Amino acid sequence: MVKPDWWIREMARKGMIEPFEERLVREGVISYGLSSFGYDLRAAPEWKIFTNVFSTVVDPKNFDPKSFVEYEGEEVIIPPNSFALTRSVEYIRMPENVIAIALGKSTYARCGIVANVTPLEPGWEGHVTLEISNTTPLPAKVYAGEGIVQLLFLEGPRPEVTYRDRKGKYQGQRGITLPRV
């Protein structure tokens, strides 16, 4: 079952989301915080912008740091048909019987900006690494400190083996985390 606002608030008070915004902040920003059936994460002001300056190949098994430029700022311009990584402002601690699915914010989607995150598995914790694609032929602006994806929390029975139990490779990640094999 999808978990409602009151459940998310209760779990955040127990440490599931830090820092936690108890209401949906909307005035003059791309909304973030608690909504009826989810929580909108904010983008941090840290960015890895993919570029083809050094003609490298993006390889998840042998990741070359020359394939991106690091940048810090309250907004970032993602080149046309390109990609950037950031992380969530919030640190997440998933309960052992809950999975979270992240969906991109519609404000960005309507501009051709797609945010992707893999599911947050039961028992996982860390900053969420956010993948942002600019699918347009134009430069695209993304804002730090504002909403980027909405998490939906789904509860089920505790699995036999949680992400924490199997010592997943992204457990406890802080900052923007690059691919690991």
Image (tube, rainbow, N blue to C red):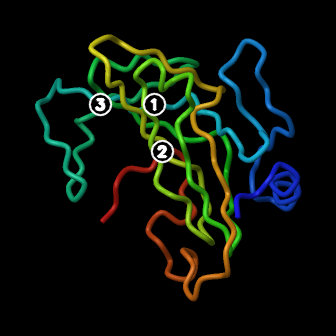
The quarter of the picture where residue 65 lies is top left
Say which residue appears at 85% left-offset and 35% top-offset.
23
Q: Are marks 3 and 1 in contact (CB under 8 Å)?
A: no
User: In the structure shown, which secondary structural element does the residue marked by tag 2 occupy?
Assistant: loop
Q: For the residue carrying disc 2, how many other residues have a C-alpha within 10 Å: few (<14), some (14-19), or many (20+)?
A: some
* Three-letter amino acid code of the residue under disc 1: Trp
Would you say 148 lies left or right of 62 here? right
Q: Do the residues labelled 2 and 1 touch (CB within 8 Å)?
A: yes
Residue assigned mark 2: 176
Q: Is residue 69 above or below residue 101?
A: above
- CA distance for labels 2 and 1: 8 Å
- CA distance for labels 3 and 1: 10 Å
The quarter of the picture where residue 8 lies is bottom right
User: In the structure shown, which secondary structural element does the residue marked by tag 3 occupy?
Assistant: strand
Q: Position of residue 7 (x, y in %)?
A: 84, 58
User: In the structure shown, which secondary structural element does the residue marked by tag 1 occupy?
Assistant: strand
Residue assigned mark 1: 47
Q: Position of residue 179 (x, y in %)?
A: 34, 54
Foreground pick, 96 / 54: 96
